[in-house]
Image (cartoon, helix red, strand yellow):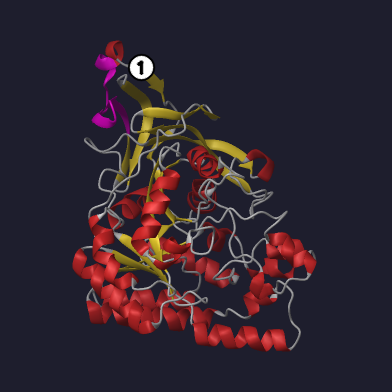
Amino acid sequence: MTRLLVRGGTVVTASGSRRADIAIDGDRIEAIEPDLSGLAGSAEVVDAAGLLVLPGVVDVHTHTRVATDAEPDRFFQDSVAAAFGGTTTFLAFNNPGTGSSPAAERSLLAGLREWRAATERDSAIDYAVSLAISGRMDDPVAELPAMVDAGVSTAKAFMVFDFRLDDVRLFEAMGVLGRRGGMLQVHCEDAILIDAAVAAALHRGNTAARYHAETRPAYAEGVATARAMAFARATGAPVHVVHLSSADALRHVREAKGLGLRVSAETCPHYLALTDERYAAADELEVAKVVISPPLRTAADRDAMWTGLAGGDLDLIATDHVPDRASTDKADALRGVPFDRISNGAPGIETLLAIAYGEGVARGRLTIERLVDVLAATPARRFGLTRKGSIEVGKDADVVLFDPAARRVLRAADLHHTSDYTPYEGLEVDGAVRSVFVRGRVVIRDGAFVGDRGYGRFVEREGAGA
């Protein structure tokens, strides 16, 4: 692999920014110095003048779909979309109920084997998996130690939906993972409160898509988050709250951190850029496009998410990318399908950096250093990606050249993901990705994909929760 010299850019880390050159030898960062012009004769020079040089984004929460006979390019194409957005490593879930075999639906380890086989040599960028623990599995808690030994140190449990873990098993899973050096991710919504609200709404004939949000109030998220934090306190295990959306839930995470618990929490771009006003749209399909769990919240909740990120109560931003399609998955709303049976989720794998920078740094809500922390350094550290997340000698040369002076409007027609819409349609944002390097190899050059299918490696992880 050719030695690269990235010259003249502003190198950004979580601790500071400086004008510096970066030498890349093979797949690692070799040197970072104010002037490495002496290496220009022995390296390919990449001009980064006027650009920010950022570590590749690490997206630890996606629901990318694996390839099928009908759609053989689906996983690959979403990895390409991630690269266009400045993401160089992503974690995916093996989604329960989305085409897995009967064996994978009943066993964590069978699901891992199946997912690894389905994604092998299929990604343009590096990737890993967090396994989804289903309450329908035979004995997933017993399989957790072997899962960690297989290089998968995180798993996700749900407190809601019909495949949720009951509290006893969730508590056990948290402790088992913690003792083995892993970390449990928890979807915090209270099933009793939500199931009762959904049943009452349907009984009244309130079936439209907007009732999805009305039946999933912030206090139902808060109650479940408080319970998860209590479990973390009792077990002493590291715990990560996924897609936190409300000030009510954030309060419990803040209190847990104040007690010194090993907890972290993420929010998502849609909670940072959108509000529950979207559920008031007259067009039923437009409402269905933002049927997400938890739902979009109030402007006050949105502001609380930004404050939490800036102050450290929230640790990172992840997409919760679901490549649903308006023409099929969300169109159920136009056919009279009740809100509780409309597919949950929205796409976002390509727009993570765009939203975080445009709505965060450009608006003065985050510093550029804090942006790097919540998009790269902390997710890599917390999820056991030891060679990722920072521009540092010896680390993987995952580098993004970002133009802060650019301005663009987000349009689905310009994106590359396998969904057919974006919830950010028409949103004007500052900044644009120019080039992306994964382990020293250019994947995006001047806004064009120049990578290869299968270049991305599966990352086996040792430990999580640091």
State the residue at coordinates (49%, 42%). Answer: 79
97 in magenta: no
Q: In front here: 400 or 171?
A: 171
Residue 37 lies in magenta, yes or no?
yes
Q: Position of residue 123 (x, y in %)?
A: 45, 39
Task: Judge whether residue 156 can be spotted in this image.
Answer: yes
Q: On the image, which quarter does residue 57 sit in?
A: top left
Residue closest to the far front: 102
104 up-or-down from 367: above or below: below
Q: Could you tell whether 278 is left or right of 10 in the image?
A: right
Which residue is under mark 1?
44
| 98 relative to 117 in the view: left or right | right
For the stretch drawn in magenta, the main secondary structure is strand
Quick check: 336 above or below 321? Answer: below
Q: Which residue appears at 56% of the width and 83% of the height? A: 194
* Whether residue 229 is visible: no
Residue 352 left/right relative to 377: right
Q: Residue at x 35, y 36 (%)?
A: 398
Which quadrant is the N terminus positioned in?
A: top left
| Residue 4: quadrant of the picture | top left
* Image spot of residue 388 (x, y percent): 30, 44
Q: Residue at x 45, y 65 (%)?
A: 105
Q: Within 10 angstroms of label 1, few (less than 14), some, or many (20 or more) residues? A: some
Q: For the C terminus, which image quadrant?
A: bottom left
Q: Which residues are magenta?
A: 19-39
